[in-house]
DNA sequence: GTGGTCTAGACCACG
DNA sequence: GTGGTCTAGACCACG
């Protein structure tokens, strides 16, 4: 599980990690039943404290994203069926795109400009 | 100057405001010489403390985004020439688009998917 | 706000405090808008660490029991109307009584025994 | 021996089991000499680890609630006479009732309210 | 002054 | 080994 933390970001570290795990699950890169790294391992990997990751896993568990089993580990929570997963994956992508377009529009860019910038960037995908 | 603050965001209020002002300047919605609201006015408009806006203006001034003149007010900083402004405006847009594409790619979306989502969202611009 | 912690209980300290605050709100001893002690004050009053109370307030806030305002303090969350409050108060009492009766029944006590014990204890209320 | 574990409770599993066994003995549902299930059986019945039940039996043995005989099994400890058993049974019931009344009183309920709630709940015993 | 995040480190519960 | 709770203490954000 590849996560990237920006320690200079004003977003709290725990929020950055939570966001990324949620995104990975929503996008289907982490699938129901997949094991997550142990708290101690992830903490050491990311160079943060055990407690910070413990909070992340607690939050995600409460929100039903993951399931933690005392003494046994942490896993991506089950989801009803494959259809729901596919829908979630689409919605996640749409949210990403919509958010970028919203920002651009708010800043006064015209749709042709945005479209051009998009085509341009997509070439070196 | 329209700013939107999300008090439930984990991003500090001062950071949200700074980001938005920087973006408005970069996108050319705020142009060199344009006046900014007084600290007191903006604070009251946004429902935040005077000190919070004072900090924002101090940061932006220090970074050369705005210029504060004691007793006369605060203004968007001058920029050499129109060309630079145009370039900044383009770069800002590219940064927005690139950031969205990066996120999508990291999450495992294929370029065709992203392209489709983009076209889709662009229709109700 | 009078809270009692049993440090020898196997119930975590934070859970004991959360339970008690929830009960006080449900029973109407703490009413919407009432201020709660500051985190630092309550921590020092109860002889526990700041972080423990911070967690309590965070949990209660997420569950909508209280509202915290950065820099300003923490308050019992608003509730629609007086009727709801009255209903909550009744339900809380019923939950207490039901829980005791359930336990007694599970342990094989007959209803007359329980009734007698109840009348007995109620005399020195 | 019917025991119910709530794995989401903040009370440790071992404490939940110990409490229930103690209560069953105090209430006379488990009588001196009655056999308890083997550690392995109970562990498998409850879906918990062998070590957890081993700890429970060790604690209960240490407290004189049960007696473990190597190779022969575990039994509810002997008690002098029938009178003591009867007294323990009454005290257990009183403890249950007192605890509920204490909680209600602390939360500001009036004795008539509690009495009414009690009568009410007792009807569907 | 009031709330929020993070670390280092100890100790417990469960497997 | 894996998750959970708690402390002491530092530093930040907001009013």
Image: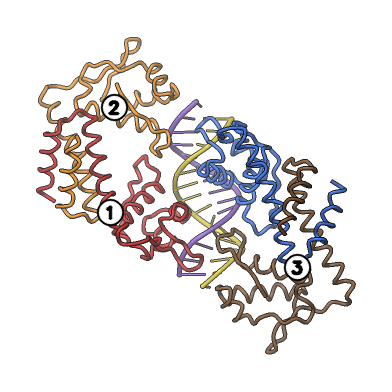
Chain colours: A red, B orange, C blue, D brown, E yellow, F purple
Q: CA distance from mark 2 to mark 1?
A: 33 Å
In this view, the residue in front, B51 or A63, is: A63
Q: Nearer the viewer, mark 3 or mark 1?
A: 3
Residue that numbered label 1 is attached to: A89
Which label sits on residue B21? 2
Residue that numbered label 3 is attached to: C108
Output the chain of dot 2.
B
Find numbered disc 3 in the image and state the secondary structure of the residue it sits on.
loop
> Marks 3 and 2: in contact by CB < 8 Å?
no
Output the chain of dot 1.
A
Asked whether, in this view, residue A65 is left or right of residue C16, the answer is left
Q: Pointer 1: residues within 10 angstroms few (<14), some, or many (20+)?
A: many
Asked whether, in this view, residue E15 is left or right of residue D124, the answer is left
Q: Estimate the x, y position of residue D83 in percent, counting from the top left.
A: 90, 72
Asked whether, in this view, residue A71 is left or right of residue C38, the answer is left
Output the chain of dot 3.
C
| Residue D9 falls in image quadrant | bottom right
| Residue B110 falls in image quadrant | bottom left
Which label sits on residue C47? none
Query: Looking at the image, is A27 positioned above or below residue E2?
Result: below
Same subunit: marks 2 and 1: no
Query: Looking at the image, is A66 positioned above or below residue B98?
Result: below
For the point 42% across and 26% down, the residue is B52
In this view, the residue in front, B125 or B39, is: B125
Asked whether, in this view, residue A16 is left or right of residue C51, the answer is left
In this view, the residue in front, B19 or C125, is: C125
């Amino acid at each position: 599980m590849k996560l990237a933390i920006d320690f200079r970001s004003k977003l709290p570290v725990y929020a950055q990690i939570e966001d990324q795990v949620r995104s990975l699950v929503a996008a289907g890169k982490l699938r129901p039943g997949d094991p997550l790294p142990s708290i101690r391992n992830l903490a050491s990997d990311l160079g943060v404290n055990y407690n910070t990751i413990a909070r992340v896993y607690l939050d995600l568990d409460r929100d039903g994203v993951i399931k933690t089993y005392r003494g046994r580990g942490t896993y991506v929570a089950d989801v009803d069926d494959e259809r729901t997963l596919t829908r979630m994956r689409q919605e996640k992508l749409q949210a990403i795109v919509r958010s970028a377009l919203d920002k651009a529009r708010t800043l006064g860019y015209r749709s042709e400009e945005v479209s051009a910038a998009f085509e341009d960037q997509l070439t070196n995908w």
